[in-house]
Amino acid sequence: MDDKLITLASLPYSKAEILRSLLELEGIDCFLENVDFLQDAMDTGVRIRIAEKDARLAFPILEKMLGKEISDHSKRENYVLVPIDFSTYSLKAALVGFDIAEKLESKMVMYHSTPRPEFLTIPYSDVIVYDSALFLNYEMTEKATSKKFEEFLNKLTSMIDYHRWKKAKPEYIVKIGEADDDILSYIQIHPPKMVVMGIRGGDARVGDLMGSTTAGVIFNTKVPVLAIPENTPDNWLNNFKTVVYATNFEAQDFIAMDKLIKLVKPFDCKVICLHVNRGDNGELDEAMLEGMREALSEKYPYAAFDCRLVRNRNLPEAIDNFIQDNRIDVLALTTHRRNLLTRFFNPSISRKLVLHTQTPILVFHA
């Protein structure tokens, strides 16, 4: 059993070499498999192979390299992170993420985590007994994941021009772990410009606007997250013209608008600042909105934006109707407006909304 090999992770070549060095420093033998210096369009990453007896020692080293450390979020790395689970949602997110990375002249990194078995051991004096069934399950999981990943890449590359794909040289990370923790840990040590992911995953419950993994990433990171619905058009970025931000005239909204305008500047789109009046003080709201328009015009003379007011007692419904009536391409929300976020994600509310069928949601920290 000591000679049996398992795949610790599948990583870009540069990261695979770093991991190999770290493992060898700890006395763990390993070798790299599937190294392709020509970087073929269907390269699925370099596999790091180790003896199964070293798995318990190797996993903490992998976790430390890919995350579990504190990083400076003000220093973003030049890449777009696209977590995938091989669902139709993540396929759409990968298409949009590829276009965004190309637009920003950044690298795209696709990240997949597969749940790993617990490495249980039973101590008998000086002997450690491994549960061989767990490693058999691990091996089956590894093969199934490799097959799904290859099928996913076949679909994805068939929808993107071959020369564009080759030029972009996207990277892939595939490892055993828990998706929520792994994605957040990787973001923590390698903050990307943006995270682009499916608004739901393959295991999302019917009626949920957003999957648990996507929601977990949104609420626990300061990196902008663009959540992509399944029915988002394939050429979405080419037609990205307008983004709407819901304001409640809070002081934080000016900080949010500043960040949002800078965030979407490379895409040459129009920002609409929307306020929903839910009953009283209509004239006051109009005056405050006009004051916001003047302040923004003075501060951002180069930016294309507008300020709009609608009347409706139901806030999510009002925003949803505005998005549909005005063909809005993105709904922008901030994590400081947690109440508004959670209301949108409430299943009893989201079932009544149609925005999530094709309108991406951009959530950023302000």
Image (cartoon, rainbow, N blue to C red):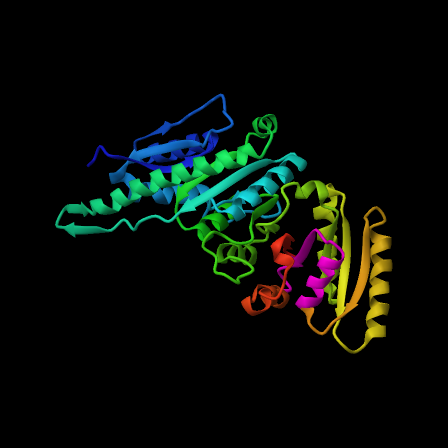
162, above or below 350, in the image: above
Against 356, residue 137 (above or below) is above
Residue with the most extreme left position: 125
On the image, the x and y values in percent for residue 94 come to 56, 41
- Residue positioned 68% across, 42% down in the render: 237
Residue 283 to residue 293: above or below: below
Q: Foreground residue, 18 or 306?
A: 306
Please state, as top left, top right, bottom left or bottom right, where the C terminus lies in the image.
Answer: bottom right
Judge from the rendering whether residue 361 lies leftward or rightward of residue 206; answer left or right: right
> Residue 189: x percent and y percent?
51, 45
Magenta segment, which residues?
316-337
Residue 168: image location, x then y, percent: 59, 30
- The residue nearer to you, when weighing 176 against 220, is 176
Q: How many marks?
A: 0
Q: Is residue 142 left or right of residue 366?
A: left
**Quadrant (top left, top right, bottom left, bottom right) of the N terminus:** top left
From where the camera sits, is residue 141 visible? Answer: yes
Answer whether residue 191 is visible to the viewer in this image: no
Locate residue 247: give its quadrant: bottom right
Q: Is residue 356 magenta?
A: no
Foreground residue among 116 and 18: 116
Q: Quadrant of residue 253?
A: bottom right
- What's the residue at 28%, 45% (across, down)? 137
Asked whether residue 317 is drawn in magenta, I would say yes
* Image spot of residue 361 (x, y percent): 63, 54
In the rendered image, the residue lying farthest to the bottom is: 280
